[in-house]
Image: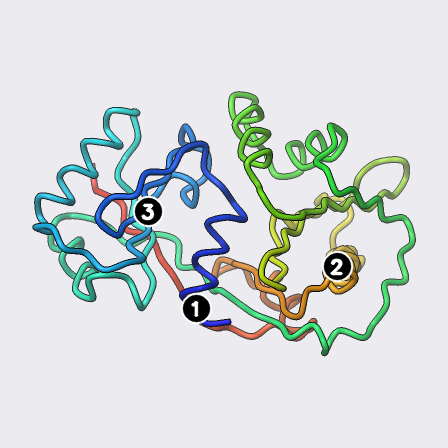
Amino acid sequence: MNAFELEEISINHWPALSTMLYDGWVLRFAEGYTKRANSISPLYASTLDLAQKIKVCEELYARRGLPAVYKLTPFAQPAHLDGLLEKMGYAMSDTISVQTLDLDRVTEEPWNRSAEISESFTADWLDAYGALSGVLPEHRSVLERMLANIQTPAACVSLRLDGRVAACGMGVLERNTLGVFCIVTDPDYRNRGLGGQLMLHLLHWGKANGAKRSYLQVETGNVPALRLYAKLGYREAYRYWYRVKKG
């Protein structure tokens, strides 16, 4: 699977509440919850006057009380967009590594048998993920509606220790590709291998449901996560970054 296809399915796997196609660009809106779901992805060829197009995008987001945010890849269209946005006062933010893994390489079985796996997003999982990742109360319903917009098979996984959820995450499957999201571990239970166990449960769920490969997205400054994913065999395919209008 090429990087362009990965961008497409990643949009599907972390859906916004509403999406607008505008001259080759994908504009996503989700009441401000996560940059990914509230940003502009310039995926396809652009034909309109670029300065006017950017102005229209700014107005569309401003109407919703949101800043205009661009999610840029090395293959964003048009090729000079990143440089133009920089000149227009858009600051770079949050560089993300997109990493992939051939699931034939995953042979290790998880030893932790406390995993709870559901192919629907249960209230318990939503509560645990919200608490562990710091989802604000006003964003809880947004998160639920976003996850309800996923149109392909998905699974959420939780690991319990001492009667509480110590780690959780989710996976979404499309085009024989498993996207991994929302991997989080309770700070009180870190450095016990739970992240690796959680990932193995998700990867084996994906394989059992026909996945041939996996991908994930991780901030380049998240050293512990990068170390974990490298140990599992993930390798960087490309990076993306955001441009956010200053002021």
Q: Secondary structure at mark 1?
A: helix
Q: Residue at x 8, y 43 (%)?
A: 52
Q: Position of residue 21 (x, y in %)?
A: 30, 43
| In the rendered image, the vertical position of residue 19 relative to residue 11, given as above or below | above
Name the image quarter holding residue 164.
top right
Q: How crowded is the residue under tag 1: few (<14 C-alpha within 10 Å), some, or many (20+)? A: some
Tag 1 or tag 3, which sits nearer the N-term?
A: 1
Left or right: 184, with 8 as reference point: right
Left or right: 144, with 118 as reference point: left
Work out how far the residue at label 1 is from the one at label 2, CA to CA, in angstroms: 23 Å
Tell me whether circle 1 and circle 2 mark residues in contact (CB < 8 Å).
no
| In the rendered image, the vertical position of residue 222 relative to residue 169, given as above or below | below
Q: Secondary structure at mark 3?
A: strand
Q: Residue at x 85, y 48 (%)?
A: 115
Q: Residue at x 58, y 66 (%)?
A: 226
Label 2 sits on residue: 209
Return the residue found at the far bottom.
105
Mark 3 residue type: Val
Label 1 sits on residue: 3
Q: How crowded is the residue under tag 3: few (<14 C-alpha within 10 Å), some, or many (20+)? A: some
Q: Position of residue 150 (x, y in %)?
A: 57, 41
Mark 2 residue type: Asn
Q: Position of residue 182 (x, y in %)?
A: 62, 47
Q: How crowded is the residue under tag 2: few (<14 C-alpha within 10 Å), some, or many (20+)? A: few
Mark 1 or mark 2: which is in front?
2
Mark 1 residue type: Ala
Label 3 sits on residue: 26
| In the rendered image, the vertical position of residue 87 relative to residue 2, given as above or below | above
